[in-house]
Image (cartoon, rainbow, N blue to C red):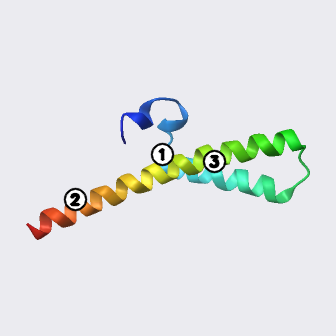
Amino acid sequence: MTEEMKAGPDERLSYEQARAELASVVERLEAGGTSLEESLALWERGEQLAEICQRWLDGARARIDAARQRAED
């Protein structure tokens, strides 16, 4: 986890926590029945969670690439 990810409480979420919350947000949006304002708030939260997940995945990819590079050397 990078220092940037440690900045706020949302960024302290594990990948699994962020992914689970994102799935919940998507379910609520797909179900409909929310006001426009609530839908927009859910969409914005989903974007935040997707960014957190992507940072975790990018970090995992970097670790894998580094391990492969060490194995090749």
In three-dimensional space, the C-alpha distance between marks 1 and 3, rounded to whole angstroms, equals 16 Å
Check disc 3 and report the residue beneath it: 47
Check disc 2 and report the residue beneath it: 66
Residue at 48% x, 36% y: name it: 12
Q: 24 above or below 1?
A: below
Residue 61 sits in quarter: bottom left
Q: Quadrant of the C terminus?
A: bottom left
Give coordinates of residue 29: x percent, y percent: 79, 54
Q: Residue furthest left?
A: 73
In three-dimensional space, the C-alpha distance between marks 3 and 2, rounded to whole angstroms, equals 28 Å
Give coordinates of residue 36: x percent, y percent: 88, 44
Q: Which of the two discs, 3 and 2, labels the residue nearer the N terminus? A: 3
Q: Secondary structure at mark 1?
A: loop
Q: Which of the two discs, 1 and 3, labels the residue nearer the N terminus? A: 1
Amino acid carrying mark 2 in the image: Ala
Q: In screen coordinates, is 17 left or right of 56? A: right
Check disc 1 and report the residue beneath it: 14
Amino acid carrying mark 1 in the image: Ser
Q: In screen coordinates, is 16 left or right of 65? A: right
In three-dimensional space, the C-alpha distance between marks 2 and 1, rounded to whole angstroms, equals 21 Å
* Other-residue count near label 3 (Cα within 10 Å), few / some / many at <14 / 14–19 / ≥20: some
Q: In screen coordinates, is 47 left or right of 4? A: right
Give coordinates of residue 49: x percent, y percent: 59, 46
Residue at 55% x, 36% y: name it: 10
CB atoms at circles 1 and 3 under 8 Å apart?
Answer: no
Residue 40 sits in quarter: top right
Point out the frontmost of discs 2 and 1: 2
Q: Secondary structure at mark 3?
A: helix
